[in-house]
Image (cartoon, grey):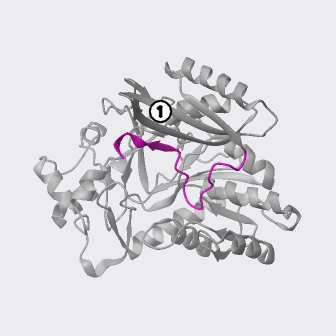
Amino acid sequence: MRINDEQLKQVDRQIKRLIAADNFYGRMLKDAGIDGVATAEDFEALPFSQKQDLRNAYPLGLSAVPEEEIVRIHSSSGTTGVPVIIPYTKKDVEDWAKMFARCYEFAGITKKDRIHITPGYGLWTAGIGFQAGCELLGSMAIPMGPGNTEKQLQMMQDLGSTVLCATSSYALLLAEEIEKRGIRQNIKLKKGVIGSERWGEKMRARIREILGIELYDIYGLTEIYGPGIGINCKYDTGMHIWDDFLYLEIIDPETGKNVPDGEWGEIVLTTLVKEGAPLIRYRTHDISRILPGECPCGCSYPRIDVIAGRSDDMMKIKGVNVFPKQIEEVLASFPELSSEYQIHISHLDGRDTMRIYVETNGSVDFAEMSKRVAERVKSKIGFTPLVKVVEIGILPRSEKKSKRVFDERYD
């Protein structure tokens, strides 16, 4: 998939706008000798932008419009450094709502639905995005935000929520609480719109089994509007990305070159019409692939596969490069194990140690299961971890995103 003529014109306009605005990003392009693009080759020669570039522009150096045109800001959490602040114009906010409403429509959600929104509100892009799309669609928004599970379940029952919007971690927590309390018959949920963190098939299956609902993956990130830039349809053949607002690339993280459709690599996004803070070739570090061919739904929007991880979440242990997804794949091969796990890495007596905590349904011999898991992990990554098997519910659940990797070597 290559950039088309209309998208090239849109990128060219964005570059000229950025340079004219003389903002942080515009100066970067100008210093690189770039004043526009005319061909696909020109586009693919453009430099990438990265999160550190955006941090260097803190607080409002990314703005490409006069301050009086900025109607809102959103921000990354800043947990790993200086936060990224993204300014939005009125049109940006409206465009985001249009994309989000389209996501709901692709999930078969209508004006008759009651949408229970649990992602956070505030500087984070989540909650307000879910709500804006809901209101534009004409559905009933139930803007709960995260936490207070007791209140969540009460409102879910009393108001007859039909759609749950949540992180996969909180969706699991709510599902398990519903099961524990025996109130499934009082819950009217039909669909779940889940985003903001990678989740495996085991977690999907558990949520689907307990709640009996259809699950939809929604994609997005703060730097590029927020959640709502793509979702899977009822055929569940990958997430459709709205290429009338964004241009999608998949690159080899090592070489920076585009890979053929169907091959795994890092998602790179370019905003085609964003006004407040346009981004050109932004490296998301999310790993996926463009799915070739047409979706059975018949729409022409390009599709990406599930997010398999991040190009920057690699752990180096005993000289071996290990990705959390590798451990997750091993754990998923054991039907006796649940979806929940934690990886702890520590440095003791001059050597690295990996400990894996994983839940099981209690019908197995814990010691024997620990040994089997450790052996299979070794065959996958080349060294033997310490494995601790615990009962379902022992590992902590999260109202936001679950932290699964704890690297204690640098604490």
In the drawing, does residue 269 fall left or right of residue 27? Answer: right
Q: Is residue 397 magenta?
A: yes
In the drawing, does residue 372 fall left or right of residue 231? Answer: right
Q: Position of residue 386 (x, y in %)?
A: 56, 29
Q: Examine the rendering and report whether any part of residue 278 can be seen.
A: yes
Residue 380 vs 151, above or below: the answer is: above
For the residue carrying disc 1, how many other residues have a C-alpha within 10 Å: few (<14), some (14-19), or many (20+)?
some
Q: Which residues are magenta?
A: 392-411
Q: Which residue is mark 1?
A: 323
Give the prevailing secondary structure in the magenta stretch. loop
Residue 360 vs 230, above or below: the answer is: above
Tag 1 secondary structure: loop
In the drawing, does residue 215 fall left or right of residue 82? Answer: right
- Going by the numbered disc 1, the residue's amino acid type is Phe
Identify the residue at horizontal 13%, vertical 46% (top origin). Answer: 32
Q: Which image quadrant is residue 255 in?
A: top left
